[in-house]
Image (cartoon, rainbow, N blue to C red):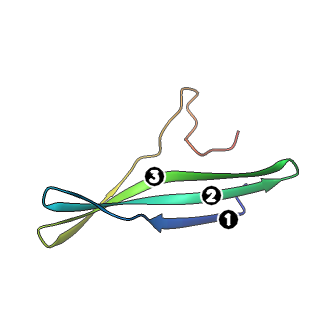
């Protein structure tokens, strides 16, 4: 189980006349054997023509039908 999780908006990238900012969720787990950190994409924020648009990403699925980021 994650003991810390936080959403972070990353620096944007200009493409043509638009600015794209990815949003990621950073999760951190700790256990007896050590710790693990993961950054999972969750959304894109797009600034174009004076408008701000948000696109949510569907969770990625693996071949065994678990979501990316699930602890198994």
Mark closest to the chain's N terminus, 2 or 3: 2
Looking at the picture, how far across and down is residue 14, in whole percent?
23, 59
Distance between mark 3 and mark 1 Cα atoms: 16 Å
Q: Nearer the viewer, residue 39 or 2?
A: 39
Q: Residue beneath label 1, please? A: 4
Lateral position of residue 70 relative to residue 53, left or right: right
Looking at the picture, how far across and down is residue 48, in whole percent?
16, 65
Q: Residue beneath label 2, please? A: 27
Distance between mark 1 and mark 2 Cα atoms: 6 Å
Distance between mark 2 and mark 3 Cα atoms: 11 Å
Looking at the picture, how far across and down is residue 27, in whole percent?
62, 58
Lateral position of residue 65 relative to residue 14, left or right: right
* Residue sitting at the far top: 63
Residue visible at 72% across and 63% down? 3
Tally of numbered tags: 3
Determine contact: label 1, label 2, CB under 8 Å: yes
**Local crowd size for mark 1, using a 10 Å CA cut-off: few (<14), some (14–19), many (≥20):** few
* Residue sitting at the far right: 32
**Local crowd size for mark 3, using a 10 Å CA cut-off: few (<14), some (14–19), many (≥20):** some
Q: Which of the 4 image quarters holds residue 42?
A: bottom left
Q: Which type of secondary structure does the marked residue at label 1 adopt?
A: strand
- Label for residue 41? 3
**Local crowd size for mark 2, using a 10 Å CA cut-off: few (<14), some (14–19), many (≥20):** some
Determine contact: label 2, label 3, CB under 8 Å: no
Q: Which of the 4 image quarters holds residue 11?
A: bottom left
Residue visible at 57% across and 67% down? 6
Q: Which type of secondary structure does the marked residue at label 3 adopt?
A: strand
Q: Which type of secondary structure does the marked residue at label 2 adopt?
A: strand
Residue visible at 14% across and 56% down? 16
Looking at the picture, how far across and down is residue 72, in whole percent?
70, 38
């Amino acid at each position: 189980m994650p003991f810390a999780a936080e959403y972070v908006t990353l620096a944007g990238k200009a493409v043509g006349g638009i600015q794209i900012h990815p949003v990621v969720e950073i999760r951190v787990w700790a256990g007896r054997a050590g710790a693990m950190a993961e950054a999972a994409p969750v959304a894109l924020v797009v600034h174009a023509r004076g408008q701000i648009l948000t696109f949510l990403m569907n969770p990625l699925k693996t071949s065994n039908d678990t979501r990316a980021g699930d602890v198994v």
